[in-house]
């Protein structure tokens, strides 16, 4: 490598010269104690800061496959450069380099991605005219951004400790005593059982009966129309416990634990094929308290708090480290860096001086877990100083918000029935304002500021914010009244003492947060959430954003979930002909009220044997193993785990307690692990099945709500390192076929015309998913003959004999295939900006583009407050009778494949 000439002197240094000079210093130092007087100034004084290599290996599009990185939860689109003629070992090809995918906006910040229609050959050779309008000395089409962990994917795939054959234990669990077996033997033993190991097979464990038929017969038993003995005999082989049919079918005792590929494995194979309700992913480890805190703060699909960074003037990064994590190095870090350079102020709330905190204007080292106190202290200062957006908070409905040019509204003015135990919101019919059969009977109620009278919220333009009255003998208070009372339980100084930060600092950041109109926002993630009070920390932080009403405003909060259709369109991939409907009480007891189950009476009510989680999904992963050991609410007969994305012994709270349970064959009779290596969790399995890495298999990773443009990422096989490895989907397809379960084999996948297609291997599913992506919205262009040639050659180079072009083509129609190739050749589908604009400093973001300021918006709505009395944005969503569980409002959040941007112009009345 050398540098281009720089300046008149042409100062430059080759790598060889540098090594020789550095070596000379070492020799002199080693030979003498004297000072080293070697002049190395010329090594560092070159004025040229961006060195350009002139020694490189030529490669073309036939040496490149675009796929998706699986090294972390960011799932960056990447480009795999294959090594020439390297398929001489067990592997089909070596990987020469991993880089970011230049077609994706996720990898090309702060520059533009190459146009989607760009020919792959031109992109590979860096020959796309005007792409990015970037000086090639600073950026190359040879690849977008990728982090160091992403680069380590080569080591992940070519790890010498990869599991290469199915393995069956021959000693006690965890003893490390194994033997290799054939796939046929492994499948047979899992289906039929093994007397040597003493475990049952799936055919013995599995049983299923539909809920409607079971519960109808159970009602007949209760009514004396059917004898209990007849019920027992009828369902003995199908139900977990005929004395407690609400536990569900025996299929629920077969549990799946995995991280991703949920649409295929959970939705299709586990739920509808097997009929088991128990498919658990990583949420309990990942931060479900954060997700639930955000979901409960919005009656919409808002699981995260993300800002519109490009237009934000003030950002609080709260309990997250986006410079190095949380979608950071390739996506958020350059966006934040440019925003700060352009004048955005960023403050960071984090107990630790993180890499992001290093870049902050103010670092707020809050006490771990005391984030809620800090948020409530800020709220008190904001309210005391009248810095909240009064006009926003007084809009009680969609229509009122629309009249005020607001994309969202809050429930601050809605009235709550304070004398009822659960504290539900009042409905118009509850207070006798309208007849029970009136159109507005279920409307929330607000006090009209113009008349002082309570009315259905949908009929009120401006509502009274602070309400504490009795209406015809019924005591009601507004949500705001309850929220304000809670906030004012302590002074700012008291909150500061709880949070471990100075009161002046709380005032400073609250002042700054309310000094930018809607162009202030908070990015919060797992930091405040992964505590026993994490749910409430997240709720308290969310209310700060409600106070300024920044949702879906330019520079405020965004929730686009922009993407393309994946599971429907050309093929209905989520539909299983004659499939089962999973039902019963989940093993992890999420989303179920204990009082409503037959176990409540059986066990004498409270205290329950183990905790129940009525307002959360059944994803409290840490509960799985204790529940299995206690056989509560029922036992686990078979556990299928994919530890490469759910290594629970290492990652779950109380992981040190898990091995003893896994070692107990009475607690869990059958354990099957699909893993790339023998890991901390899979070492306790009865069978370890070799799993391909992300560079060797299919996947579709979901979109994230921190971007305004739509994308869908496809992970496709690029190389084959372990020929005998099988994706878990393929294993399940074979197992389900042996058990004669629906959703696999012939006539498994319906297309849009109702014709049925087979599902025999993973590509049968994912190639149809690619077709759905290709035809979503405006269909992509057909790949040309030359591009289809490139596709064939690149996959032959990468996969060798394991690439079956005819089989891949046969998974879709002849008409669809050229469009599928277009999507696969680019590693997915990536929307392009519609209008070129800049931020505050055009020189910093040369080549960047963004949508117009007032485009299609995602109306962010929010949930009821329930008994917590916390402020929350809301819509016409109806809460449950307990006032705790919100229902999404009609049109509140678009399905994947809708919006491109969710920002609007700055409001006319910024505070």
Image: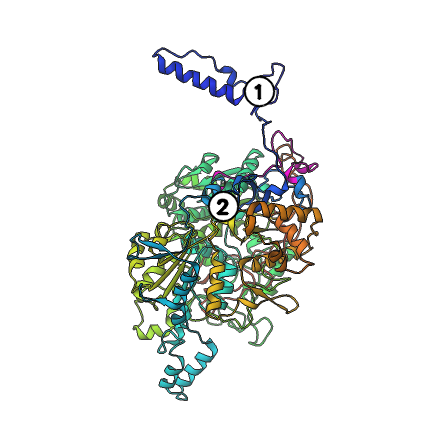
Which quadrant of the structure image shows residue 451?
bottom right
* Residue appearing at x 45%, y 81% in the figure: 216
Instruction: State which quarter of the image contains the N terminus.
Output: top right
Please state the horizontal and vertical placement of residue 706, each as a whole percent of the image: 55, 48
What's the image's color scheme?
A: rainbow
Which quadrant of the structure image shows residue 639?
bottom left
Q: Is residue 302 left or right of residue 255?
A: right
Please state the horizontal and vertical placement of residue 478, each as a whole percent of the image: 49, 61
Mark toward the start of the polypeptide (2 vs 1): 1
Count residues near mark 1 (Cα–Cα under 10 Å), then give few for <14, some for 14-19, many for 20+: few
Residue 898 belongs to the span the image colors magenta? no
Judging by the rendered image, the residue that carries numbered circle 1 is 47
> Nearest the camera: 741 or 801?
801
Determine if residue 469 is in view.
no
Please state the horizontal and vertical placement of residue 308, each as a whole percent of the image: 57, 45
> Nearest the camera: 727 or 603?
727
Determine if residue 189 is in view.
yes
Count residues near mark 2 (Cα–Cα under 10 Å), then give few for <14, some for 14-19, many for 20+: some
> Nearest the camera: 399 or 344?
344
Judging by the rendered image, the residue that carries numbered circle 2 is 91
* Residue 688, numbered circle: none
Q: Which residues are magenta?
A: 123-150
Q: Is residue 635 left or right of residue 92?
A: left
> Nearest the camera: 804 or 731?
804
Q: What is the C-alpha distance between the residues marked 2 and 1?
A: 45 Å
Please state the horizontal and vertical placement of residue 31, each as a whole percent of the image: 36, 13
Q: Secondary structure at mark 2?
A: loop
Instruction: State which quarter of the image contains the C terminus.
Output: top right
């Amino acid at each position: 490598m050398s540098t281009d000439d720089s300046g008149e002197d042409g100062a430059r240094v080759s790598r060889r010269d540098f090594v020789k000079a550095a070596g000379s210093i070492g020799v002199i130092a080693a030979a003498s104690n004297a000072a080293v007087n070697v002049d190395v100034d010329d090594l560092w004084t070159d004025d040229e800061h961006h060195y350009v290599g002139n020694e490189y290996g030529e490669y073309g599009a036939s040496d490149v496959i675009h796929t998706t990185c699986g090294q972390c939860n960011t799932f960056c689109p990447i480009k795999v450069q294959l090594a020439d003629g390297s398929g001489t070992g067990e592997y089909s090809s070596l990987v020469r380099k991993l880089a970011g995918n230049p077609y994706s906006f996720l990898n090309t910040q702060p520059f533009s991605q190459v146009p989607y229609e760009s020919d792959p050959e031109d992109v590979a050779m860096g020959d796309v005219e005007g792409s990015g309008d970037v000086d090639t000395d600073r950026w190359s089409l040879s690849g977008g951004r990728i982090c160091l962990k992403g680069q380590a994917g080569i080591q992940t795939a070519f790890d010498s400790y990869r599991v290469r054959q199915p393995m069956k234990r021959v000693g006690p669990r965890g003893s490390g005593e194994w033997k290799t077996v054939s796939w046929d033997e492994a499948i047979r033993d899992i289906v039929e059982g093994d007397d040597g190991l003493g475990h049952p097979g799936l055919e013995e464990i599995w049983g299923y009966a539909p809920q409607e038929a079971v519960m109808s017969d159970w009602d007949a038993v209760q009514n004396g129309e059917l004898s209990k003995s007849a019920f027992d005999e009828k369902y003995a082989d199908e139900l977990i416990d005929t004395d407690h049919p609400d536990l569900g079918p025996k299929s629920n005792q077969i549990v799946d634990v995995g991280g991703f590929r949920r649409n295929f494995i959970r939705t299709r194979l586990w739920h509808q094929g097997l009929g088991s309700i128990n498919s658990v992913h990583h949420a309990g480890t990942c931060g479900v308290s954060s997700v639930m805190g955000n979901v409960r703060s919005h009656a919409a699909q808002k699981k995260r708090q993300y800002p519109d960074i490009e237009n934000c003037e003030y950002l609080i990064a709260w309990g997250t480290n986006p410079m190095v994590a949380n979608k950071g190095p390739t996506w958020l870090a350059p966006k934040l860096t440019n925003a700060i350079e352009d004048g955005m102020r960023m403050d960071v709330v984090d107990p630790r001086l993180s890499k992001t905190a290093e870049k902050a204007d103010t670092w707020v080292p809050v006490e771990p877990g005391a984030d809620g106190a800090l948020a409530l202290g800020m709220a008190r200062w904001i309210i005391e100083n009248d810095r909240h957006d009064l006009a926003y908070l007084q809009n009680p409905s969609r229509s009122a918000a629309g009249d005020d040019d607001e994309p969202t509204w809050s429930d601050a003015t809605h009235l709550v029935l304070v004398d009822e135990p659960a504290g539900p919101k009042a409905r118009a019919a509850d207070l006798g304002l309208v007849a029970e059969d009136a159109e507005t009977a279920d409307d929330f109620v607000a006090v009209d500021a113009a008349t002082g009278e309570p009315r259905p919220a949908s009929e009120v333009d401006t509502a009274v914010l602070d309400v504490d009255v009795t209406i015809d003998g019924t005591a009601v208070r507004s949500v705001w009244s309850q929220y304000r009372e809670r906030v004012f339980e302590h002074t700012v100084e008291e909150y500061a003492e709880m949070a471990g930060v100075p009161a002046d600092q709380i005032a400073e950041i609250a002042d700054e947060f309310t000094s930018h109109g809607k162009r202030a926002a908070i990015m919060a993630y797992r930091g405040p959430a992964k505590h026993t009070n994490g749910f409430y920390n997240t709720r308290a932080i969310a209310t700060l954003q409600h106070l300024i009403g920044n949702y879906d405003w330019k520079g405020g909060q965004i929730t686009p979930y922009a993407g393309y259709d994946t599971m429907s369109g050309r093929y209905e991939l989520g539909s299983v002909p004659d499939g089962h409907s999973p039902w019963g009480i989940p093993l992890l007891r999420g989303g179920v009220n204990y009082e409503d189950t037959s176990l409540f009476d059986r066990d004498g009510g409270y205290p329950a044997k183990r905790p129940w989680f009525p307002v959360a999904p059944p994803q409290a992963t840490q509960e799985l193993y204790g529940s299995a050991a206690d056989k509560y609410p029922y036992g686990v007969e078979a556990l299928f785990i994919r530890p490469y994305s759910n290594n629970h012994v290492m990652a779950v709270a109380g992981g040190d307690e898990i091995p003893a349970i896994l070692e107990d064959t009475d607690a869990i009779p059958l354990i099957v692990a699909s893993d790339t290596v023998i890991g901390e969790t899979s070492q306790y399995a009865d069978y370890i099945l070799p799993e391909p890495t992300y560079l060797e298999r299919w996947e579709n990773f979901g979109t994230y709500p921190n971007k305004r443009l739509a994308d869908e990422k496809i992970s496709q096989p690029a190389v084959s390192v372990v020929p005998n490895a099988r994706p878990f989907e393929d294993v399940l397809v074979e197992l389900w076929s042996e058990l004669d379960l629906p959703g696999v084999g012939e006539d498994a996948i319906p297309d849009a015309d109702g014709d049925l297609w087979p599902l025999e291997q993973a590509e049968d599913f994912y190639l149809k998913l690619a077709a759905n992506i290709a035809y979503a919205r405006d269909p992509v262009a057909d790949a040309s003959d030359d591009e289809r040639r490139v596709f064939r050659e690149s996959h032959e180079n990468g996969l060798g004999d394991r690439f079956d072009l005819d089989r891949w083509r046969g998974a879709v129609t002849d008409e669809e295939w050229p469009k599928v190739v277009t999507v696969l050749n680019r590693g997915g589908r990536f929307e392009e900006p519609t209008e070129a604009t800049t931020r505050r400093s055009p020189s910093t973001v040369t080549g960047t583009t963004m949508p117009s300021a007032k485009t299609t918006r995602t109306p962010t709505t929010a949930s009821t407050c329930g008994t917590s009395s916390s402020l929350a944005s809301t819509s016409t969503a109806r809460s449950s009778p307990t006032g705790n569980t919100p229902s999404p409002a009609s049109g509140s959040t678009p399905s994947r494949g809708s919006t491109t941007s969710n920002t609007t112009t700055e409001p006319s009345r910024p505070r």
